Amino acid sequence: MDVAVGSTNPVKIDAVERTLERFDPTVTAVAVDSGVPEQPWSIDETVTGADTRARRALEATGADYGVGLEGGVARLEGVPGLSLIMWAAVTDGERLERGGGPTLPLPDDVATRLEAGAELGPVMDDRLGTDGIAKDEGAAGVLTAGLTSRAQALGEAVACAFGPFVADSDRSRPSR
Ligand SMILES: O=c1[nH]c(=O)c2ncn([C@@H]3O[C@H](COP(=O)(O)OP(=O)(O)OP(=O)(O)O)[C@@H](O)[C@H]3O)c2[nH]1
Ligand SMILES: [Mg+2]
């Protein structure tokens, strides 16, 4: 199975490789433009970024599947404060399916800086004195003290978006 990922961020490649391990995939990283701002600010923008990355990765390679992963922030109805969200899109060139990853609360000082126009990765680096945390454990790892990691969190989104292509549709349908 050939899978093209619309990013060169190693953490996104890792998320796809570890999630699809059972299919022994050949995973190719493709630099594409997400078509949305570097820091998406809504579910809509985040999902659109994931969709565009998936389509462009597939177009650029002719792989079996294109995968797009996008991180964003959003104020969610019923959830106080600013949330970190992540979405995946998978396409085989005909259909496109989407899946969401975990949602994390962002600390108020981080939210304030994002509201002023900053991007999450650099804000986290500045706060921690690190360089490139988004390519490593990510905000998801830091804000959970390692209980999850960015690769693991993104992997859940990949699994949910990939499911419709590989699940047995009869068995996955609820029986009645
Ligand atoms: O979903 C996430 N989970 C995390 O744990 C995390 N830690 C940092 N960020 C930041 O979120 C912004 C958009 O992310 P993003 O999808 O554009 O990724 P990216 O910029 O790292 O890679 P890419 O654009 O080269 O593919 C960027 O500022 C990332 O640094 C995370 N996003
Ligand atoms: Mg980015």
Image (cartoon, grey):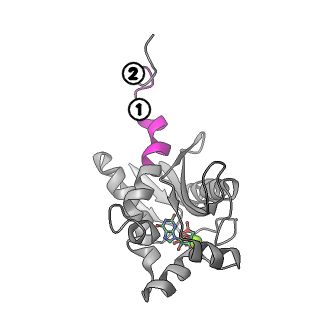
Q: Magenta segment range?
A: 158-170
Query: Mark 1–mark 2 contact, CB under 8 Å?
Result: yes
| Residue 60 screen position, x and y as percent | 57, 61
| Residue 58 screen position, x and y as percent | 55, 55
x 44%, y 38%: residue = 163
| The CB of the residue at mark 1 lies under 8 Å from ligand 1 | no
Q: Crowding near pointer 2: few (<14 within 10 Å), some, many (20+)?
A: few
Please say whether residue 160 is one of the residues in the magenta stretch. yes
Q: CA distance from mark 1 to mark 2?
A: 8 Å
**Vertical relation: 34 (above or below) 48:** below
| Residue 148 screen position, x and y as percent | 35, 61
| Residue picked out by circle 2 | 171
| The CB of the residue at mark 2 lies under 8 Å from ligand 1 | no
- Ligand 2 shown in quarter: bottom right
Classify residue 110 as left or right of residue 65. right
In the picture as drawn, the residue positioned furthest to the top comes out as: 176
Q: Which SS class for mark 2?
A: loop
x 46%, y 74%: residue = 134
Q: Crowding near pointer 1: few (<14 within 10 Å), some, many (20+)?
A: few
Secondary structure mostly taken by the magenta-highlighted segment of the chain: helix
Classify residue 44 as left or right of residue 61. right
x 40%, y 27%: residue = 168
Assign the C terminus to one quadrant of the image: top left
Q: Which SS class for mark 1?
A: loop
| Label number found at residue 167 | 1
Q: Nearer the viewer, residue 117 or 34?
A: 117
x 64%, y 79%: residue = 113
Name the quadrant containing residue 145: bottom left
Residue type, label 1: Ala
Q: Nearer the viewer, residue 11 or 148?
A: 148
Q: Nearer the viewer, residue 38 or 123?
A: 123
Residue type, label 2: Arg
